[in-house]
Amino acid sequence: MRQMLTTFINALMSAEADAVCGAEYGARSEERTNSRNGYRYRGFDTRAGTLDVAVPKLRQGSYFPDWLLERRRHA
């Protein structure tokens, strides 16, 4: 169950990052406005336990799934 949730959440975030970039991951496109630059790994607490999700990073600007995770703040 946890693995299925992790895979689903990662796929949703990847699709959103693709939409922000204007092209799918690794694809060349004239419409591309940004590129991916790896992932940030974050813990996401659920009733099924803590999931380790991979949040995509972008070369320019930022992508953060506000619908899923709270931003981390410095103390």
Image (cartoon, rainbow, N blue to C red):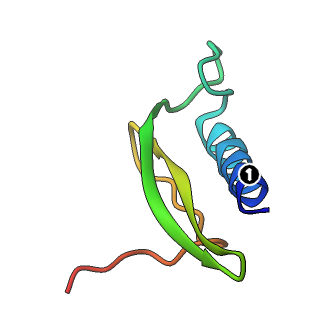
Residue under the image location 49 percent in, 68 percent down: 43
The image quadrant that residue 49 belongs to is: bottom right
Name the image quarter holding the C terminus: bottom left
Q: Amino acid at mark 1?
A: Leu
Q: Position of residue 4 (x, y in %)?
A: 78, 54
Q: Viewer-proximal residue, 11 or 35?
A: 11
Q: Position of residue 35 (x, y in %)?
A: 49, 30
Residue under the image location 71 percent in, 76 percent down: 48
Q: Which residue is mark 1?
A: 12
Q: Secondary structure at mark 1?
A: helix
Residue under the image location 68 percent in, 27 percent down: 24
Q: Viewer-proximal residue, 46 or 23?
A: 46
The correct choice, above or below, for 61 with respect to 25 in the image is below
**Is 2 left, or right, of 69 in this rendering?**
right
The correct choice, above or below, for 43 with respect to 46 in the image is above
Q: Viewer-proximal residue, 60 or 74?
A: 74
* The furthest residue to the left: 75
The image quadrant that residue 17 belongs to is: top right
**Is 36 left, or right, of 75 in this rendering?**
right
